[in-house]
Amino acid sequence: MIFTLKNETIILGFICGILFFAFQARAADPFLSKGDVPESGGFRTVTLLKNLDHPWGMAWLPDGNMLVTERSGKLLLVDKAFSAQQVQGVPKVYVNGQAGLLDVTLHPDFSTNRIIYLSYAHGRRTENGLRVAKAKMENLVLKDVQVIFEVSQKKFGTQHFGSRFVWLPDKTLLFSVGDGGNPPVWLNGGFIRNQAQDTKSHLGKVLRMRADGTVPADNPFSGSSEADPLIWSIGHRNIQGLAVDPLTGKVWSSEHGALGGDELNIIEKGGNYGWPEVTYSREYTGFSITDERSRPGMINPKLVWLKAIAPSGLLVYTGNGFLQWQGDLFAGGLVSQNVRRIDLDANGNIQGEQSIRIGARVRDVSQGPDGMIYVLTDEDAGKLIRISPAPGKAPPSP
Ligand SMILES: [Ca+2]
């Protein structure tokens, strides 16, 4: 052979380089969920409350009571005996299709300041958008209601508002805004979904604000004239699940695709998650949206549900009710009518998935102060359901 040692070293280095990048690319490939998901056992479900009108979000109060939103515009205080009373003073909400009263969350210092946050659709069919309001809750009345956010791009129709809240440890608030709708909904010379890649638009984003609604100085586009300073991440279709893992600090999101291709992502500051230029999902007609599944500079999902579950509320479970499930993710599914437990190993890698059958469209998933898992179902007579270990049985295996 005529290779010199130097040449061999270069060739070996080259091969190692290719293997390294191939491994990196493989490591970053998403876990593909094809729909053949095994059923989980070892739990039971109990219906605690019936006849909720399309409940959407829930938040636990320090005293063990909870707040529940109904999409039709009511905010309910549910006490520990699971009896519900209406809270007065909710702002006027646009209710139609996916539009309505959406998520609710408490200020991190709620126990001293009694402040809550609501997200909701505002406007009318021809011109509407997401709003966020904060208010002080005094017994069963909201006082000092202040609108602290309104989507700057008004849209037509009743699709894709987002919206979930999650607090970061620094007491800033992340919330999702949907892309505005499916074709043929149109804005500024293109399908409105293209707004998800426009850094001057709120649509199709995760946004981050301070508790008073102002822009944190360390947002990725803070001080830029090229982008909206509230933007935290871009390229999202419709995130309806957001959760922070208190141990790792990771922010997880679950996001609707169109036909198939729902995603589970880890949200990073300034990240581009690809929609609609990169996606596993297809148009509802079956036509292709794009052939691209991945692109340099865009962040791959951690998991893709090739068969859509229509993801809703998301939970990182940390309770003592199910010790083997600690650290796992629980993603509600509207279409799948179950809660998917996503089994994570100690490094946060996805090991697999199980189905906790609910038998109705699941809208939100939350961990109660008792360490049990609570679910809201999206129905005319929606339910609050508790998932707890089956009596007399060993807890379910990991
Ligand atoms: Ca994506």
Image: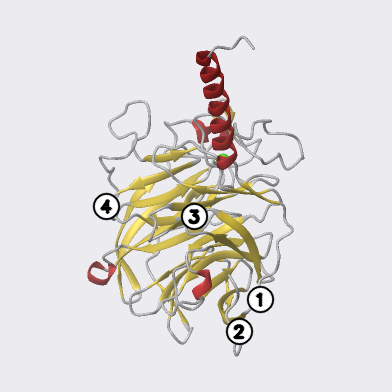
Which residue sits at x=72%, y=34%? 288
Callout 1 secondary element: loop
| Label 3 environment density (alpha carbons within 10 Å; few <14, some 14–19, many ≥20) | few
Where's the C terminus, which quadrant?
A: bottom right
Query: Are circles 2 and 1 on residues that touch, CB within 8 Å?
Result: yes
* Numbered circle sitting on residue 390: 2
> Viewed as shown, does residue 106 lie left or right of 329?
left
Query: Are circles 4 and 1 on residues that touch, CB within 8 Å?
Result: no
Query: Is tag 2's residue or tag 4's residue first in the polypeptide sequence?
Result: 4
> Viewed as shown, does residue 189 lie left or right of 368?
right
Above/below status of 29 relative to 392: above
| Residue marked by disc 4 | 212
Callout 4 secondary element: loop
Where's the N terminus, which quadrant?
A: top right
Query: Is tag 3's residue or tag 2's residue first in the polypeptide sequence?
Result: 3
Label 3 vs label 2, nearer the camera? 3
